[in-house]
Amino acid sequence: MTFEEELLEIEKQAQPGAFSTFDMEVFVPEVRKLNAGEIYLEVGCDKGRSLSIARLVIKPDINMYGVDVAKSPELEGYLKDHPEIEFFWMKSTTAAQVWKERRMPQIYLLFIDGDHSYQAVRADLEAWEPHLAINATILFHDADETSPGVLQAMTEFVDKHRNMKSFQLFKRTDKNTSMAKIQL
């Protein structure tokens, strides 16, 4: 089975929502890089589509976490069926404070797809940065001109971290979708 065929199969099993096969082309390989005991955390889960895709492809011994303020029936139902995913029903910045208070482990893959305003993305980055492992990866959804707040906060973060390993933008105009990846 080719990677494209595999993505179509994953897409059929995933929760409904806005996350294209192009997004999956960037996202799935990063989730698969995680090793036993490492942490995946998603900020902004909406109906649970990307969270469900991560769960479908993640190795068994990876710890999954999600954060969102808005409760959707789709996501709530999905989480009831998957109690192995720890979820924070609160603002991302509040969840990061709880993470600190609980002395939770470092995060190896952080996926940011919450509030797309500049202030919110910047606050997400500032709140979660202290919890990132060395060599962590940050993925951003909607990292293009349709979400200028995401672009601005992400660009400032990249400028601040000149010693990072890599920064890549992935854009498909024919599908109106984009992702970005920062490798610290």
Image (cartoon, rainbow, N blue to C red):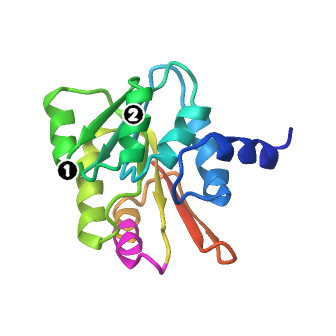
Residue 7 can be seen in this image: yes
The nearer-to-camera label among 2 and 1 is 2
Any magenta on residue 148?
yes
For mark 1, does the 10 Å Cα neighbourhood hold few (<14), some (14 to 19), or many (20 or more) residues? Answer: some
Residue shown at 48% from the left, 24% from the top: 62
Q: CA distance from mark 2 to mark 1?
A: 21 Å
- Identify residue type, mark 1: Thr
**Residue closer to the observer: 120 or 44:** 44
**Residue closer to the observer: 86 or 93:** 86
Judged left or right of residue 99, residue 62 is right
- In what element is the residue under mark 1? helix
Q: Which residue is mark 1?
A: 93
Overall secondary structure of the magenta section: helix
Residue 21 x/y as whole percent? 67, 56
- Identify residue type, mark 2: Leu
- In what element is the residue under mark 2? helix
Which contiguous range is marked in magenta? 145-154
Residue shown at 52% from the left, 40% from the top: 52
Judged left or right of residue 72, residue 130 is left
Q: Which residue is mark 2?
A: 79
Residue shown at 81% from the left, 46% from the top: 5
For mark 2, does the 10 Å Cα neighbourhood hold few (<14), some (14 to 19), or many (20 or more) residues? Answer: some
Which quadrant is home to the N terminus? top right
Residue 171 x/y as whole percent? 62, 70
Residue 154 x/y as whole percent? 39, 66
Any magenta on residue 147?
yes
Q: Is residue 76 above or below residue 18?
A: above
